[in-house]
Amino acid sequence: MTTPQNVALADAVKGISMFRKVDIPVLGVVENMSYHLCSQCGHQEALFGEGGGLKVSGEHQVPLLGQLPLDATIGRQMDKGTPVLVTEPEGPLAQRYLNIAARVAAGLYFSGNTIPTRLYTRQV
C-alpha cells in the first residue's frame, strides 16, 4: 500500500525489497489517495501526484492491484465502524475494494505460493 508521493513510494520500494529478501511473496501494489473526486461536481484531481503506484509496480515487476480515491465517505464510514462494503455494497467505492480483493485472491491462487508457516504459528 502506498500513496502517490515520492516519499511514500520510496517506503513501498523498501517494503518490496525487504519482503523479497526474506522470501515473502509480494502480490502487488495498492495506491491509496490516488485522486480526489469532488462530491459536488465530479471533477477528479490527483492531489498527491499521479502514476506513482504504476511506476513502482512496473519497476519491481509486481501488479498494480488497484487505486483508491481520497474520499470522505471512507473515513466517515470507518469511524462509525461500518465499512463502505457494508453500507454501500453496490457503490463504486465498494467495487474498487472488491476488485482489489479479487486480484489479491487470484494472485495467491495463481502464484502457487503459500504463506510461510513462521508467519502465522507461534513457536512454543
Image (cartoon, rainbow, N blue to C red):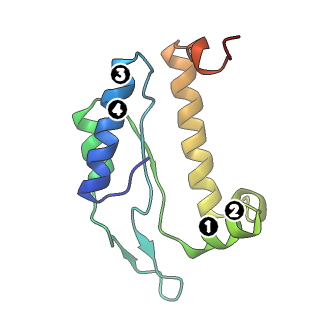
* Callout 3: SS: helix
Q: Earlier in the sequence, mark 2 or mark 1?
A: 1
Quarter of the image with the C terminus is top right
- Other residues around mark 2 within 10 Å, as few (<14) / some (14–19) / many (≥20): many
Give the residue type at disc 3: Arg
- The reply to whether dot 4 and dot 3 touch (C-beta < 8 Å) is yes
- Quarter-of-image position of residue 60: top left
Task: Give the alpha-carbon distance from disc 3 to disc 1, as whole Å.
Answer: 31 Å
Q: Locate residue 87, reporting x and y percent.
A: 77, 65
Give residue 106's mark. none
Of badges 3 and 1, nearer the viewer stands 3
Give residue 74's mark. 1
- Quarter-of-image position of residue 27: top left
Of badges 2 and 3, nearer the viewer stands 3
- The reply to whether dot 2 and dot 1 touch (C-beta < 8 Å) is yes
Q: Which residue in the protein does label 2 denote?
A: 84
* Callout 2: SS: helix
- Other residues around mark 1 within 10 Å, as few (<14) / some (14–19) / many (≥20): some
Give the residue type at disc 2: Val
